[in-house]
Image: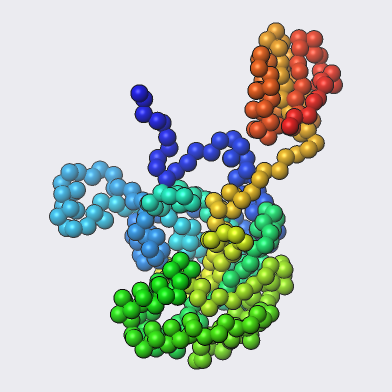
Amino acid sequence: MASPVTPPRGMRDFLPRDKARREHALGIIRSVYSRFGFDEIETPVVEDFARLHSGLGGDNEKLAFNVLKRGLTPEDAVSAAESGSLDSLADLGLRFDLTVPLARFYATHRAELPPVFRAVQIAPVWRAERPQKGRYRQFMQCDIDIIGEAGPLAEIELISATSAALSALGLTGCRVRINDRRLLTGMLDAFGFVPAEHPGVLITVDKLDKIGTAGVLAELREREATPEAVNRLEEFFARPTPEDQLFGEAQIRSQLPLGVDDSVIAELTMIGAAAAHADSTPVIFDPFLVRGMGYYTGPIFEIEHPGLGYSLGGGGRYDGMIGRFLGQDVPATGFSIGFERVVDLLELTEDASSDSLVLVYDRDVAPAALVGLKSELITSGKRVRLEKRVKNLKALLDRVTGEGFTAFAFVTASTASAAELDLKPLG
């Protein structure tokens, strides 16, 4: 028995119907981002190995697909194995996100770009994930980034544009959760965690939705975090839940311990209020929103959808990244839509105006006549498919209906022009 012929594990083929739905969604996203003043760029699928493993990509660096150097010899492999690291065998790698390539792109082309650059990147990325439902080794990312704007206007624009894109896709009920990495640091300081503990503590706190407060506290104690700090966090978890309040400074303050930076609270209040006003997407403050990427330096945000246990997108400010290439800090912030999650929620709407049709032709119709009819219809703006008439006509019509066609017509040897076609609706 022949082995099944399938794509590489964790990667997928897309049938025409699936591809059409994806392109429909991408077209809407591109259109919205263009109207918001963002310009689309494109970067190579590969970057230098050293750049992809420079500490900018967080844990994703461990999931990079590396590209071997050309001309390697068995001796090179032996030498690398003896050194305890195979890194010397690779000089390139597939991009695992679009942020690191953007940072490199900006460093390369800065002199050709405006002082504040608004970028769109929509492209596939690759990660050596353990494949499972919702996790793939190749997937599409839709990123918008603003480079060169240090103030909260950048975050407001990103949240507004992303909210508008999701709304244009027909996704309702979404909310924006926002926080700030500086508030997280201030909270940890207020509880008494020493700075060296912060990265590990944040990794654990980021699991709050999955393991609950009891699980977070237990894991922190297993990590041997400062006991007094863990106890203060436990007391904070046990405090009465603040009453529902409209988003604002009072609401944010009510969910934080004493001692955090008032100026950061004021900035976050401005971002959330302005973004919600611009697109009417509800904004909520989440004091325990972490976002795992270690390069975030300021405001962070996620889009949540009712009924789903995961976000539909996220982002934040990463002011220190581009400076790693340029030798000087450049403010930057970005937002990425989780395209694979979004597209699974969408249905492809059909055009009810019969702009796509199938010509079902008899066997005795001359090819030249068929091509002439098809060309005439295409010129008038229709999408046309030729299908030979078969005995099981219902199966044929069901198939083309599923492929998105909205009408059909029979073509005989006597059909002289498109005007003679009797168009019948499908579906």
Going 25% across and 43% down the picture, which residue do you hit? 71
How many tags in the picture?
0
Residue 420 pos. (x, y %): 84, 18
Q: Quadrant of the N terminus?
A: top left
Residue 262 pos. (x, y %): 56, 89
Going 24% across and 54% down the picture, which residue do you hit? 86
Is residue 388 in view from this perspective?
A: no
Q: Nearest the camera: 31 or 116?
A: 31
Most distant residue in the top direction: 364
Is residue 181 in view from this perspective?
A: yes
Q: Nearest the camera: 77 or 59?
A: 59
Going 59% across and 49% down the picture, which residue do you hit? 343
Does 191 sit above or below residue 99?
A: below
Q: Nearest the camera: 119 or 225?
A: 225
Residue 270 pos. (x, y %): 65, 80
The image quadrant of residue 349 is top right
Q: Quadrant of the C terminus?
A: top right
Going 31% across and 53% down the picture, which residue do you hit? 91
Q: Nearest the camera: 331 or 276?
A: 276
Q: Would you say 77 lies left or right of 222 here? A: left
Most distant residue in the right direction: 419
Q: Would you say 212 lies left or right of 392 here? A: left
Q: How is the image coloured?
A: rainbow
Residue 108 pos. (x, y %): 47, 61
